[in-house]
Image: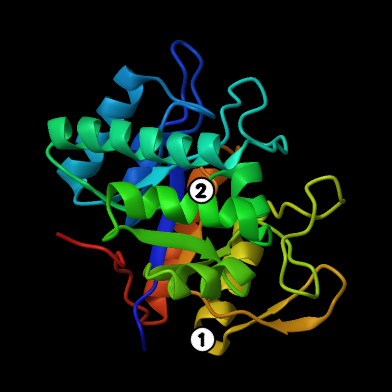
Amino acid sequence: MTPIDLNSDLGESFGPWPMGDDSSMLSIVTSANIACGFHAGDPAGILSVLKEAARRGVSVGAHVGYRDLVGFGRRNMDPTSAELVADTIFQIGALQGLARAAGTRVHYVKPHGALYNTIAHDARQAADVIEGIKAIDPSLKLMALAGAPIVSQARAAGLTVVCEAFADRAYNADGTLASRRLPGSVIHDPQTIAERMLRMVVESRMIAIDGTDIALEAQSICIHGDTPAAVAVARTLRDTLVSRGIELKAFAHG
């Protein structure tokens, strides 16, 4: 069976305000999406997380987002193309510098929050992010929502795309993520999460929020690091997959 990657959003603490348990998550996941300072994270904290990721051999990606610290990058925005291209380059470049100092390097880009959801279907903003990635390092892989139009758009532009599924988020019948405003849109029970992800890995299928059985094929599974049960969810998921003989492996190495 093809190996699966486990990823989590880390490096999101800001000064004295902690966000998640990065150290514990780094002992579980195989890839870490590291905040770049626009939606969360400060340089000292980001550098510390990068150093631990390097020590543990966890692959690192740039978690680029809208310039939205107050809204944690979850508010919809409409920057110009010039702004979004430059913001993408700026964030990746900043993380590359910190990663180099930490003894590791950036292997991929995973947009955050509202930017991630917007570019999944907004061809203009998607093109801007793709242009930014290609301008600074076209070898970087793009992590994107499985089944979304950006997957084919980015591949047509020459990027390698890794499709991901969200362990703790409910899906609509069309394969999009259910709005966080809906009851049941965020799943909290570790065993439920592990069982649905096991089925996704083995059968490439999942039950949507309305009960529809949908196809979903992904090479990486995201576990949000900022939820109260994040560590328990990650450990249960990892243990469940390993117990079924599924290899956990980062999609980017070196």
Contact check, label 1 and label 2, Cβ < 8 Å: no
Residue 78 position within the rendered picture, expressed as x and y whole percent measured from the top left = 69, 38
Measured as percent of width and height from the top left, residue 52 is found at 23, 36
Q: Residue at x 39, y 34 (%)?
A: 91
Inter-mark Cα distance, 1 to 2:
27 Å
Residue 54 sits in which quadrant? Answer: top left
Q: How many marks can you see?
A: 2
- Seen at 26% across and 26% down, the residue is 48
Q: Is residue 46 above or below residue 204?
A: above
Give the number of the mark in front: 1 or 2: 2
Image: 94 above or below 9:
above
> Could you say which disc has been placed on residue 202 in the image?
1
Residue drawn where x is 52% and y is 62% of the image: 144
Q: Nearer the viewer, residue 130 or 9?
A: 130
Task: Report whether residue 162 is seen.
Answer: yes
| Left or right of residue 182: residue 228 | left
Disc number for residue 124: none
On the image, the x and y values in percent for residue 187 come to 71, 55
Outermost residue, top direction? 16
What secondary structure is marked by label 2? loop
**Circle 1: is it few (<14), some (14-19), or many (20+) Cα within 10 Å?**
some
Pointer 2 residue: 111
* Dot 1 or dot 2, earlier in sequence: 2
Residue at x 20%, y 62% (from the top left corner)? 253
Give left or right: position of 96 versus 196: left
Q: Amino acid at mark 1?
A: Val
* Quadrant of the image occupied by residue 49: top left
Q: Amino acid at mark 2?
A: Pro
